Image: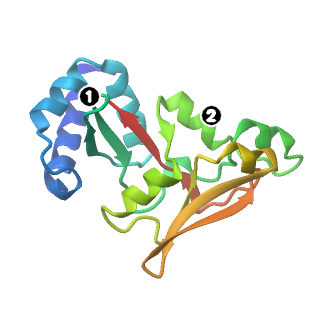
Amino acid sequence: MTPKRQAELLKTLRARFETNSGRHEGVDWAAVQARLAAAPDKLSALEKMESTGGEPDVVAYDATIDRYVFYDCSAESPIGRRSLCYDREALERRKQNKPEGNAIDAASRMGIEILSEDEYQRLQTLGSFDTKTSSWVATPPAIRTLGGAIFCDRRYNRVFTYHNGADSYYAARGFRGSLKV
């Protein structure tokens, strides 16, 4: 990433941080920025989150691991990460009308982790997300072994967790990620 693009991204992240202070009470932007300056790989991952429509923002400071936690905070599932099946196994098993990729590999290439169901529930305490879309979440192995995967959304002012075949994909379903810096 060029120094100019780094500066633009930091400006965007700072503006979002300041506009949404309720997401990260007690967190100081200068400390976050210093951490990002020392971790160019994390800044690159945030750039990928941003460029795919995720609108990453700080949602917590985890003192147990001394890391700031970013989540995708776009109102709807990131537009640049939709129409993906859950994982590579599901993609390979799909015989026709294959999507271009899968959520787990896409997250890995970006350097982020797909949100867990608990993280998704936490995100929803910070606002109303996925009111028109849905997002794959990390699926427990017991469900995945049986061919399924789980996703979440918010409807009727309530957060729901659903199941689907891992090889399914929809234009309105993507995934949200987290990054610890």
Residue 55 location (% of width, % of height): 34, 49
Q: Position of residue 98 (x, y in %)?
A: 79, 47
Q: What residue type is labelled 1?
A: Asp
The quadrant of the image that shows the N terminus is: top left
In the rendered view, does 162 fall on the left or right side of 72?
A: right
**Residue behind mark 2:** 105
Report the disc number at residue 66. Answer: 1
The residue drawn where x is 39% and y is 35% is 179
Quadrant housing the C terminus: top left
Sequence-earlier tag: 2 or 1: 1
Circle 2 Cα neighbour tier, 10 Å, few/some/many (<14 / 14–19 / ≥20): some
Marks 1 and 2: in contact by CB < 8 Å?
A: no
- Quarter of the rendering containing residue 171: bottom right
Up the image or down, 169 lies above or below 57; here it is below
At mark 1, the secondary structure is loop
Side of 63 where 95 appears, left or right: right
Residue furthest front in the image: 64
Disc 2 versus disc 1: nearer the observer: 1
As displayed, is residue 144 above or below residue 10? below
Counting other residues with Cα less than 10 Å from the Cα at mark 1, is it few (<14), some (14-19), or many (20 or more)? few
Residue type at the position of mark 2: Asp
Q: Is residue 111 above or below residue 77?
A: above
What percent of the width, then of the height, locates residue 8? 22, 34
Residue at x-position 49% and y-position 46%: 115
Q: Can residue 132 be seen in this view?
A: no
